[in-house]
Amino acid sequence: MTALEYTAEESAGDDMTHPEIAKWDPTFTELLINAATPVIKRWFRPEVRGLETFPSRGGALLVSNHSGGVLTPDWNVLAPALYRRFGYDRPLYTLAHYGVFFTPFRASLSRLGVIHANPENADEALRSGAVVLAFPGGDYDAFRPTLSQNVIDFGGRTGYVRTAIQAGVPIVPAVSIGGQETQLFLTRGNWLAKRLGLKRFRIEILPITIGLPFGMTLFFPANMPLPAKIVYQLLEPIDIAARFGEDPDVDEVDAYVRSVMQAALDGLGRARRFPILG
């Protein structure tokens, strides 16, 4: 899968002439998941915990850290587990940066429920009763250095909180471990992107990684991920109004979400015996 992110401020101006959520195809999604799951199970030995606390109905904003670089395994681990539990009558929409759609697979992504990350799309999907998956840190998070692999860092992005407040849905935090072990992440390359003036193209990082088969790369070509064990932990839903009142402070909510995610990720880190093996 491609690197996904949710950046409401960046995507608010995207032109949406047709409702994107209507493009989700449950039959296509089920066929793809059934075809890919045997490979995913053998390669990543995925384990998804905490599904029993996930809201069984109504809209929910699933907020996760993002791992693995370009070929992130996150969706491939989460989506099968959610559909297996709730069935294909309840869509999972994934918010994606506009750059994800500049690929030959754009139509297929839409059929899988991948939608542009803008407030309108997110609000419409949540109000329809669907689960919406957001990676607030986006590629900034997915390319975090290996030495900081167990650090929750959204790069200061808080648009996800405003979306949950506006739609009146709970935030369900989720954390994963193992994705940053699929190759060696040396640096996000913020300094390099800035030096090259790439920000005018909405590119703020130029990550340097080492992996197989291409060795050291700058973003592309994408190395194949090593077969690391991926563990996902879904946490207790957060009712924003109940915890923070009817007029919540966005920064306070964001700080709380990140704190519970960091505590959970620290726990997964302490329980992990060996890199790659889990």
Image (tube, grey):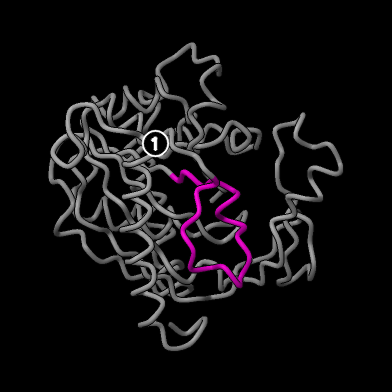
Image position of 13 with respect to 257: above or below:
above
* Residues shaded magenta: 135-155
- 152 on left or right of 58: right
Residue at x 42% of width, y 70% of height: 230
Q: Is residue 139 magenta?
A: yes
- Looking at this view, is 57 or 241 the one in front? 241
Q: Quadrant of residue 196?
A: top right
- Looking at this view, is 252 or 156 the one in front? 252
Give SS at disc 1.
helix
Q: Main secondary structure of the magenta part?
A: loop
Q: Is residue 154 magenta?
A: yes
Instruction: Provide residue 71's location: percent of width, then percent of height.
Output: 59, 57
Image position of 201 with respect to 53: above or below:
above
- 253 on left or right of 115: left
Residue at x 39% of width, y 36% of height: 160
Instruction: Provide residue 252's location: percent of width, then percent of height.
Output: 33, 41
- 212 on left or right of 54: right
- Looking at this view, is 263 or 193 the one in front? 263
Residue at x 37% of width, y 32% of height: 24
Q: Which residue matches tag 1?
A: 160
Instruction: Provide residue 180's location: percent of width, then percent of height.
Output: 55, 68
Q: Amino acid at mark 1?
A: Tyr
Label 1, residues with CA under 10 Å away: few <14, some 14-19, many ≥20: many
Please, which residue is most extreme toward the bottom here? 273
Please, which residue is most extreme toward the top here? 17
Instruction: Provide residue 93's location: percent of width, then percent of height.
Output: 36, 37
Residue at x 69% of width, y 64% of height: 223
